[in-house]
Image (cartoon, rainbow, N blue to C red):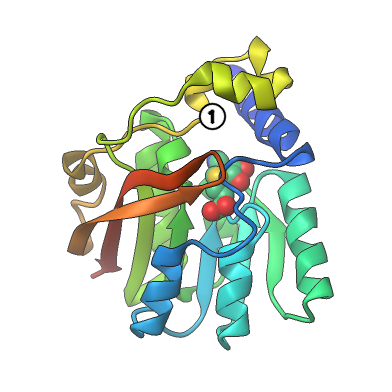
Amino acid sequence: MREQKEEEGITIDLFESVYHGQAPWDIGRPQKEYIQLEQTGEIVGSVLDVGCGTGENALYLAEQGHEVWGIDFAPTAIQKAQEKAAQRHLTATFRVLNVLELHTLGRRFDTVIDSGLFHSLSDEKRHPFVDNLAAVMDHGGTYFMLCFSELTPIPDFSKLLDRMPDFSKVKLEDYTGRRVTQAEIKESFQDGWRINYIRQATVEASIEPGGFHAWLSSISKE
Ligand code: SAH
């Protein structure tokens, strides 16, 4: 248990150190897949953004009139999100929280969005995360997940190290996102969930002008 806590602490520190600079996934605007989901009316009601980072997707949805909460375990990301909300005169609730403790929020949302969180979780954390997700969703509510697919090449670490010297000490693979297959998504959401679709999509990133290959999944709680 103690080992697990220590490992968790290191992971938080790493994301923190990236957020002290410019995170490569932080493009300063919402991901286009989420703009499209909003414009086609797929995102309904209250929204929780899990692993919200500095809040671009959450703030976009707040601007569109949704009640929005965003959580992330990196305090600097949450602080940046809160500052952006104030600057833009938008109302959204941002909290420092681990996604394995979502149940402590004590409330449910109509929609949950995930841009790059699921692919940063280790295998052991996937099932506990999905259980936590179920605790904050209404029946019939939908979870939208954008994650790297196996078609995305492993990044050029030397390029990343250039931008983030702090990373030289650590296992970069853990922080650049895992590669996820459709079979892994289906395995994680077997019981109590309905997979509406898993589509080919793109994750935009500042380090890759064309973006990365991704899966966009729509998964409803039964
Ligand atoms: N959604 C944001 C950030 C994506 S990067 C965006 O699109 O820009 C993944 C985010 O998940 C990081 O901000 C990281 O701090 C957060 N994260 C990773 N594991 C987490 C966990 N166990 N609990 C809460 N947040 C986590």
| Residue 52 appearing in the image | yes
State the residue at coordinates (72%, 80%).
Answer: 91
**Would you say 19 lies left or right of 178 here?**
right
Task: State the image quarter where residue 3 is shown.
Answer: top right
Q: Residue at x 38, y 43 (%)?
A: 212
Q: Is residue 211 left or right of residue 104?
A: left
Q: Dot 1 lies on which element?
A: loop
Measured as percent of width and height from the top left, residue 34 is found at 43, 68
Whether 180 is drawn above or below 66: the answer is above
Question: Which quarter of the image is occupied by the N terminus?
Answer: top right
Provide residue 162's location: percent of width, then percent of height: 66, 21
Amino acid carrying mark 1 in the image: Tyr
Query: What residue is at 78 percent from the left and 46 percent from the top?
Result: 76
As drawn, 219 above or below 20: below
Q: Is mark 1 within 8 Å of ligand 1?
A: no
Q: Residue furthest bottom?
A: 65
The residue that appears at 65% across and 13% down in the rendered structure is 168
How many numbered tags mark residues here?
Answer: 1
Horizontal arrangement in the rendering, residue 116 relative to residue 212 (left or right): right
The residue closer to the viewer here, 83 or 95, is: 83
For residue 75, side relative to residue 129 (left or right): right
Q: What is the x, y in percent for residue 6?
A: 65, 21
Tell which of 85 and 24 is nearer to you.
Answer: 24
Residue 6 visible in the snapshot = no
Residue occupied by mark 1:
175
State which quarter of the image contains the C terminus: bottom left
- Dot 1 crowding, Cα within 10 Å, few <14, some 14–19, many 20+: some
Query: Which residue is situated farthest in the top direction here?
Result: 169
Where is residue 132? Give x, y as percent: 45, 54
